[in-house]
Amino acid sequence: MGLRVFSRVKELHSHGVCHRDLHVGNIVVQDGQPLFVDMEFAAASDPAKPCYDLIGPERSGVSVPRRHAEQPNANQHGVWWDAENSEVKTLGHAFGSLQDLSERLANL
C-alpha cells in the first residue's frame, strides 16, 4: 500500500495539486486504491518543482497552511511524508521513509 500511496501523491502533484495535510487519517482505501480526503488545505503547485507532500515546505517552496502555522504544536511546521514530531501519524511512520520506498521501487 505504501508504494500505491507514494504513486498517488506523485500523480496528484503531476496535476498541479499539493494536499499539504497528508497523513494516515486523510487516506481512505476504495477497491484497493488509496484516495486522499480532507482537501481543505490543498493548494496549486508547480509540477516541475519539488512536492510539498513528499519533502515539506522548506525544500518545496510551498508555504505551510496558515491554520497549521498558527497551531501551538508540532504541526505548525507542516505535515508531509517524513515530517518529524508530527501530531498525526505520518505516511513515513505507516509505510516507511521516502528513501525506503525509493529503494523498494528500484528493486521491482
Image (cartoon, rainbow, N blue to C red):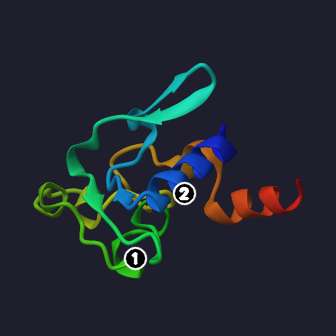
Q: Is residue 69 left or right of residue 62?
A: left
Q: Residues within 10 Å of mark 2 (few under 14, many from 20)?
A: some
- Distance from the alpha carbon under mark 1 to that under mark 2: 14 Å
Q: Secondary structure at mark 2?
A: helix
3 to 33, vertically: above or below? below
Using the image as rendered, state which of residue 33 and residue 58 is in the foreground: 33
Q: Residue 60, labelled with which disc?
A: 1
Using the image as rendered, state which of residue 73 and residue 38 is in the foreground: 38
Using the image as rendered, state which of residue 71 and residue 20 is in the foreground: 20
Q: Residue at x 34, y 72 (%)?
A: 57
In the picture of the structure, the residue carrying the numbered disc 2 is 10
Nearest to N terminus: mark 1 or mark 2: 2
The amino acid type of the residue labelled 1 equals: Ser
Q: Residue at x 40, y 48 (%)?
A: 22
Q: Residue at x 44, y 61 (%)?
A: 83
The amino acid type of the residue labelled 2 equals: Lys
Q: Secondary structure at mark 1?
A: helix
Q: Are marks 1 and 2 in contact (CB under 8 Å)?
A: no
108 to 40, vertically: above or below? below
Q: Position of residue 72 (x, y in %)?
A: 14, 58
Point out the frontmost of discs 1 and 2. 2
Q: Residues within 10 Å of mark 1 (few under 14, many from 20)?
A: some
- Residue 67 found in image quarter: bottom left
Residue projecting furthest to the front: 15
Q: Is residue 77 left or right of residue 10?
A: left
Q: Is residue 102 left or right of residue 89?
A: right
Identify the image quadrant of the N terminus: top right
Using the image as rendered, state which of residue 105 and residue 68 is in the foreground: 105
The mark total stands at: 2
- Residue 79 found in image quarter: bottom left
12 to 2, vertically: above or below? below
